[in-house]
Each structure stands twice: as C-alpha cells, then as structure tokens.
Image (tube, grey):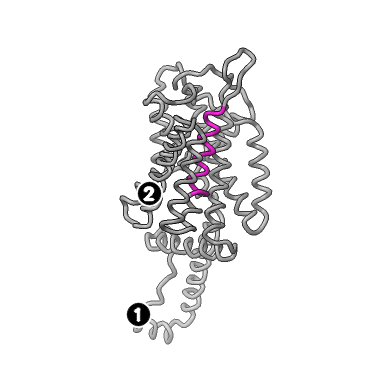
C-alpha cells in the first residue's frame, strides 16, 4: 500500500503540469489541460484511493508553491478532489451475502458524478469571485459578449441603422413621423439583446455543470479503459447499458429547483445541480437506449442514427434523452443484469 503513495505523488505532479499549462492560453495548452484529471483517476482506479489522494496533495502543493496559491486551490477544488472522489467510489465494494464482492452501482456513481460536477463549478466560482455580485457582473459581461457575437452573425436582430447624414436630413424635413418607429425598433432590439444576455447569464451555471458532468463521465470511462488494458483495474468491468440512477436522484432534482429560487451562491448551486442532473439523466437515457436495443435486428443502425441525430441537432435531441432517462428512473422497469462487457 505504501508503494502507491510515490506513484500517486508523481501522477499529481503530472496532473499539475497539465493543469498549469493553461496559463499559456494556446490551443495545445487547452488540449493538455483537458487531460489533467486522467493521471489522478488512473492511479485511483489502478492502484488505490490513497495514491489518488497523494496525487491531489502533491499537485496542489506544487502549483501553490511554484505558481500561485490560488491556482493550487483551484486545481484541488475543480479537478483533483473530484477525480479522487469519483475514483474512490468507482472501486468501492463490500462483501455480499454469497461471499462475493458487491461493487458500487454505476447508477449511483453517475448521480455522484453529477453532484460532484455541480459542486466543483460552484467551488471554482467562489474561489475566483468570493463576492457574488462580482461573479454575477462577470457572468453578465461574458453573456453580453456572446450575444454581441450572435447579433453580428444575424441570429439575433440588430438595432436598425439611423441612416446616412443626407438621409437623416431628408427624413427630418419630409417624414418626421418615421423617426419614432426607428427609435422604437432600436429600443426593442436592444431590450431583446439585453433579455437574452440576462437569460444566458442565469442559465450559465447549468450549462457549465452540464458540460462538466459529461466531461467527468468521459474521464472516468477513459481512465477505466486505460487501466483495464494494463490489467490493473480493481473491479470487473460493469455492464454500462444497465446503468440506472436511484429514484432519490429525482428528489435531488426537485430540491435543486427549490434551491435555484434563492439568491447568491445558494441559487447558483441549485441551477448547477439542475444542469448536472439533466446531463446525468440524458446519459442514462442513452444507456437505456443501448440496453433496450440489445439483441434486436438493426441495432447498429439504430444506435448510429441516434448519435447522428444528436450531432446534427447540436444537442436539441438531448432533451428527449433527458425525458427518457427521467421516465426510466420513475418507471424502473429494467431488470438488473449481471456484470459483463458492454
């Protein structure tokens, strides 16, 4: 067990290096940054959770001492601790009545992925802006920039132009009544852009947590595959299509909605939880589609069509998967299956 600590410490330094290159702000730096959680997850899934915890400590300390204390704290809260926690749950098991090991269910693990993603987003938000008003103003400014880009692309109506100087003189003398509708149209367009920006700023935590949930799920799957290939995976490969979150996830979703009505970071947490669990239910809906199509003729064509639809609609079809996942949990009609490869 003590041999896992040096391995974990080395993995933590690698993860910290991948995380720290983000300061370069280049395309390659961003790609390397996206790989940062993998070393910690690999150690946690293939060696031990103590080794993964050593990776958290070594990586955070290295960034805090050699770069910035805030960067070390951000590394720990946003990526390292979530990676350690999810790896710990993934290899958690207990002795069953028959003497075999009962591994932590993938459905509960998926729920924890969603909860961890929401907490990680709120943690990094608090670290970056301890004052909520500052955080909200930064979010609003970012949303306005996004809306301005959409206006330039013509997806949101732009304010009508007042015309050239000569045209303005002619309109003033010949058709003074036409200036009022133009001004009113400009005000309405400005109001529309402002409303869109405000709405985007409100749902931004949900969108961020939604994306982080999908990323954490992918990281966990990729790390487990890498460790499985090396022969060090500490648990048998689970039957992923049979993944189904418990009904308590629905209670968490309802509580998140109530929490989102509050002000401050409590409301941000509620919105983030709603986004994270919506992504988790979408992933469950995707798993249920895989599960229910097993053994059916043309299964490959059905699955290929589903993924093409998801790609072409740019996530619009994800709403159907969310509803499918929620219905799957509510009805609970899928029978549990034995472990096997998916």
Picture coordinates of residue 327, whole percent (x, y): 60, 31
Pick the residue in front: 44 or 217: 44
Say the numbered circle drawn on residue 45.
Answer: none
Local secondary structure at mark 2: helix
Element on which disc 1 rests = loop
Q: Do the residues labelled 1 and 2 touch (CB within 8 Å)?
A: no
Q: Main secondary structure of the magenta part?
A: helix
Nearer to me, 186 or 149: 149
In the figure, 80 relative to 169: above or below? above
Residue farthest along the top direction in this orientation? 98
- In front of the other: label 1 or label 2? 2
Q: Name the residue under label 2.
A: 17
- Quadrant of the image containing the C terminus: top left
Q: Position of residue 141 (x, y in %)?
A: 49, 65
Residue 145 on the magenta segment: no
Return the residue nearer the eye: 243 or 46. 46
- Left or right of 122 on screen, residue 301: left
Question: Reading the chain from its start, which is encountered first: label 1 or label 2?
Answer: 2
Q: Position of residue 334 (x, y in %)?
A: 58, 22
Badge 1 crowding class, 10 Å Cα cut-off, few under 14, some 14 to 19, many 20 or more, is few
**Magenta-span inclusion, residue 90:** yes
The CA span between labels 1 and 2 is: 55 Å
Residue occupying image coordinates x 44% and y 47%: 59
Q: Is residue 270 above or below residue 180?
A: above
Q: Which region shows up in magenta?
A: 76-92
**Number of marks drawn:** 2
Q: Which residue is drawn at 41% across and 39% down?
A: 39
Residue that badge 1 annotates: 164
Q: How crowded is mark 2: few (under 14 residues within 10 Å), some or many (20 or more)?
A: some
Q: 240 and 286: which one is in front?
A: 240
**Image quadrant where residue 156 sits:** bottom left
Name the residue located 64 percent from the left edge and 59 percent from the top edge. 264
């Amino acid at each position: 067990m003590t041999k896992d600590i040096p391995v974990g410490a080395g993995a933590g330094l690698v993860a910290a290096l991948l995380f720290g290159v983000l300061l370069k702000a280049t395309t390659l730096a961003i790609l390397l940054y996206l790989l940062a959680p993998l070393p910690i997850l690999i150690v946690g899934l293939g060696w031990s959770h103590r080794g993964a915890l050593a990776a958290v400590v070594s990586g955070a300390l290295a960034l805090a001492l050699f770069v910035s204390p805030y960067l070390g704290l951000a590394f720990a809260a946003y990526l390292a601790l979530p990676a350690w926690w999810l790896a710990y749950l993934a290899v958690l098991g207990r002795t069953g009545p028959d003497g075999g090991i009962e591994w932590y269910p993938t459905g509960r693990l998926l729920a924890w992925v969603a909860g961890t993603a929401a907490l990680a987003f709120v943690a990094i938000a608090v670290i970056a802006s301890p004052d909520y008003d500052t955080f909200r103003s930064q979010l609003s400014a970012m949303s306005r920039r996004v809306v301005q880009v959409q206006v330039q692309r013509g997806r949101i109506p732009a304010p009508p132009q007042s015309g050239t100087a000569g045209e303005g003189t002619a309109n003033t003398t010949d058709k003074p009544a036409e200036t009022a509708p133009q001004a009113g149209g400009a005000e309405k367009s400005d109001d529309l852009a402002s409303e869109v920006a405000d709405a985007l700023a409100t749902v931004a935590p949900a969108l961020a947590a939604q994306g982080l949930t999908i990323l954490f799920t992918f990281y966990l799957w990729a790390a487990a595959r890498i460790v499985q290939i090396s022969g060090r995976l500490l648990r048998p490969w689970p039957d992923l299509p049979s993944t189904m979150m418990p009904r308590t996830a629905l209670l968490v979703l309802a509580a998140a909605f109530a929490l989102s009505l509050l002000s401050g970071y409590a409301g941000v947490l509620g919105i983030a939880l709603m986004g994270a669990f919506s992504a988790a239910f979408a992933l469950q809906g995707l798993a249920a589609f895989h599960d229910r199509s097993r053994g059916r003729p043309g299964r490959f064509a059905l699955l290929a069509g589903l993924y093409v639809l998801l790609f072409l609609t740019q996530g619009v079809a994800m709403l159907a998967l969310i509803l499918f996942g929620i219905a799957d949990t509510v009805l609970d009609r899928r029978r549990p299956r034995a472990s096997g490869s998916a």
